[in-house]
Amino acid sequence: MSTLLIQNARYIVSCDGSDTLWEQANLLLQDNTIAYIGPDAQEAERTIDASRMAVYPGLVNTHHHLYQLFSRNLPEVQRMELFPWLTALYEVWKGLDEEVVYHSSLMGMAELLKTGCTTCFDHHYVFPERAGDLIAAQFRAADQLGMRFHASRGSMDRSKKDGGLPPDSVVQSIDAIMADSERLVSTWHDSSPFSMHQVALAPCSPFSVTGDLMRESAKLARSLGVRLHTHLAETKDEERYTLEKFGLRPVAYMESLGWIGPDVWYAHGIHFDDSELDLLAQTGTGVAHCPASNMKLSSGVCRVPEMLEKGVPVGLALDGSASNDGCDMLEELRVAYLLHRLHASHRAPTGYDLLKMATRGSAKVLGRSDIGCLAPGMAADLFLVDLDRLPLVGAQFDPKSMLSTVGLKGDVDYTIVNGVPVVEKGRLTALCEEDAVRQANAVVRRYLGR
């Protein structure tokens, strides 16, 4: 048994059910779980002096597209909204291969870990022919870094010739998608407590998949005991598409396909009406809130205040690295705080509400009860921030809200995942950052041909 003591922490922000804030307290990790939090002295094999630090639960990212890291900041798409943006970038993404996906996932997850994110769900849905085993490449990257990783077997079967957006070369038949989905769940999914690997089935969106694929994916996921995920209600263009093609608003269309319930969560969820929010709350259907991406693509403002009031499960998410242009969950916290203060004023979630959304809320959306807060018996996923740094002068007296209201400029000091320090003094422990960046930039140049 290995033990690690976070000693004499100035603050421990638990995000537990009682909103406990510990001061000058100790946190003992035994193997991959939290064994103790409190004032009493503890013995351990290794000790981290946290007397100047605040300790937080690891952040949980509920929707990402790591492969897009290598197509961010391309000038030709910077002024586009979602549909033309996708149409343009599919011409880049159809060149994906296993090397690109491995290095983009490695770099994205590295940035996530350095900014306090300990669990990442990635929505990968572009599978060019003969590209290799892309999901295995993502798990390889996660394992190298020590990140808790939820992958998806995304999919598309409606190409341009069928009225969809993607080119023919990145869509697949339903039979091929189902066979590979079953293979990946069998190979990688671990439903046990504290698992480091999980898989969800995740057809891309109503405008790139058929109803048959949605139905078959739901049937297979429920037979295998895994969760379901898709993009929904992201833009008014999507709403017009489902009304014209199916005679239904997006949520009603999803409901008609069996895509609603506590094992389902949607990315974005911007354009829900009141009755749809009530249905999501009643059925326990979750939403991954992606504020920065929604702003960059001019998609709209998600109704997070109303969702929280009604009890809709909501988690925080980054979305694609090319529609966010970053992998920093701490930045996303502050963006979310400022966006909703502007849009909803006194009804906006507080800074601490948003921290809980990014921890406990996100864990619930992913169907996890073993991560998301700091308490004995929970997974040993957490990060530490030295409060005696220049950008936090005068900001230290409300540690629950600080990361949202003031924000953190720069990397965290320590990130611990499953009891293992993966970031120490702001540096990754399992990777030479300079070598990894050099290799990744070489792959980017080859992939983009520029």
Image (spheres, rainbow, N blue to C red):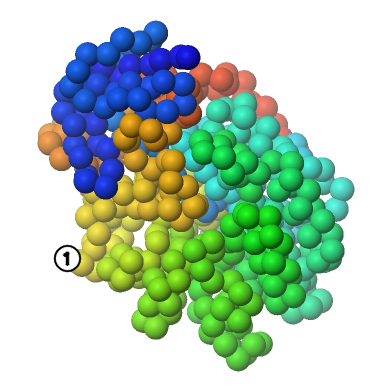
Percent x, y for residue 325? 51, 48
Q: Is residue 421 left or right of residue 390?
A: right
Q: Residue at x 52, y 78 (%)?
A: 251
Q: Secondary structure at mark 1?
A: helix
Give the quarter of the figure containing the C terminus.
Answer: top right
Percent x, y for residue 1? 47, 14
Q: Residue at x 79, y 53 (%)?
A: 180
Q: Residue furthest right?
A: 130
Q: Is residue 323 left or right of residue 14?
A: right
Q: Residue at x 60, y 91 (%)?
A: 247
Visible in this render: residue 447?
A: no
Q: Around disc 1, counting alpha carbons within 10 Å, would you say few (fewer than 14), some (14 to 19), or many (20 or more)?
A: few
The image quadrant of residue 37 is top left
Percent x, y for residue 131? 82, 46
Residue placed most toward the observer, 294 or 13: 13
Q: Residue at x 56, y 20 (%)?
A: 430
Amino acid found under the numbered disc labelled 1: His
The image quadrant of residue 370 is top left
Labels in figure, total: 1
The image quadrant of residue 283 is bottom left
Residue 268 position (above or below residue 245): above
Q: Is residue 413 left or right of residue 434?
A: left
Residue placed most toward the observer, 159 or 303: 303
Q: Is residue 314 left or right of residue 69?
A: left
Visible in this render: residue 55?
A: yes
Residue 181 position (above or below residue 48): below
On the image, numbered disc 1 is attached to which residue? 346
Percent x, y for residue 253? 59, 81
